[in-house]
Image: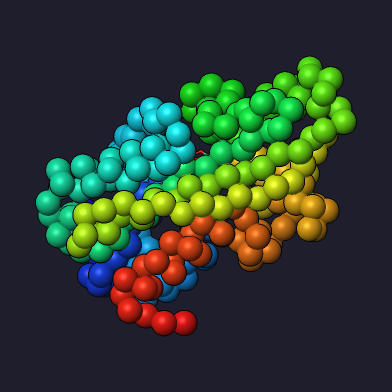
Amino acid sequence: MYMELKLQYNNTSNILIATGNAHKFKEIKEIIGGCGGLNPIFLDKSYGIEIIEDGKTYEENAKIKAAGYIDYLNKKPDLKKFLDIQFILSEDSGLEVERLDGAPGLFTARYAGENASDSSNIEKLLMEMSLKKECASNRRAKFVCYACLYDTTENNFQYFYGELSGFIAENASGTKGFGYDPVFIVPEFNKTAALLDSAQKNAISHRGTAFRKAADAIKSKLNIHG
Ligand code: ITT
């Protein structure tokens, strides 16, 4: 069962990216790079890892995700031993629209209901904004990201924050990225995030900021400079 991972990771010291979202994993992998020679690992849906995000804050949810992966691995000692995880990185992120009083916020991933698709979430967001007259003149919004770093050798959790301010477009455009990217206008480029290359998005995104801080913390723990 672990053959594929073995080929991919060659049994070295690893960093587990505790997310079920393959788009997030791709971005995080690009952002943290080699990070001290650690291999970023993604356990896809076939591993059946279920996390109930019932925290009251983004930080709580980020910790719940990291702790959920720790529990999962503790129940799979062979996989745990094989993966030789040194760090676990998770995150909780969301979109906050000023004139919707910060909604969708903690419910960003499931704004249009449990297991909602990106397009139905976007549709709901544009509908809610069209129903609120204050949104006609103010479409300001921000993405927020709370990264959580768990160090298996110290058994502690650290948090890193990033945000990206912008505006919600009237219509979706672009096919890159994920989630609400097709309606999130990045002022610096005057384009939606779904029209940016991943390097452009990562350089300024909420996730880019939070995970570069996490990567610096990891490098400092590993005594790596530069
Ligand atoms: P995990 O919990 O497994 O990490 P998730 O997609 O459920 O994956 P969250 O609970 O943190 O993640 O939900 C955050 C949602 O916010 C995400 O599903 C997107 O809809 C949206 N989001 C976060 N970052 C985004 C980005 O960079 N671009 C577009 N949408 C984003």
Most distant residue in the right direction: 137
- Colour approach in the figure: rainbow
The answer to whether residue 37 is visible is: no
In-image side of 218 versus 103 (left or right): left
Q: Is residue 102 above or below residue 179?
A: above
**Residue 71, percent across and down?**
21, 42
Seen from the viewer's position, the closer of residues 95 and 221 is: 221
Q: Which residue is pictured at 18% across the width and 54% down the height?
A: 79
Residue at image coords 79%, 19%:
132
Name which quarter of the figure residue 150 lies in: bottom left
Give percent across and percent down for residue 166: 74, 46
**Residue at position x 67%, y 42% in the image:** 142
Using the rendered image of the protein, determine whether residue 79 is visible from the camera's viewpoint: yes
Q: Position of residue 164 (x, y in %)?
A: 65, 50
Residue 32 is left or right of residue 187, and the answer is: left
Name the spot of residue 126 as percent of width and height, x first: 75, 27
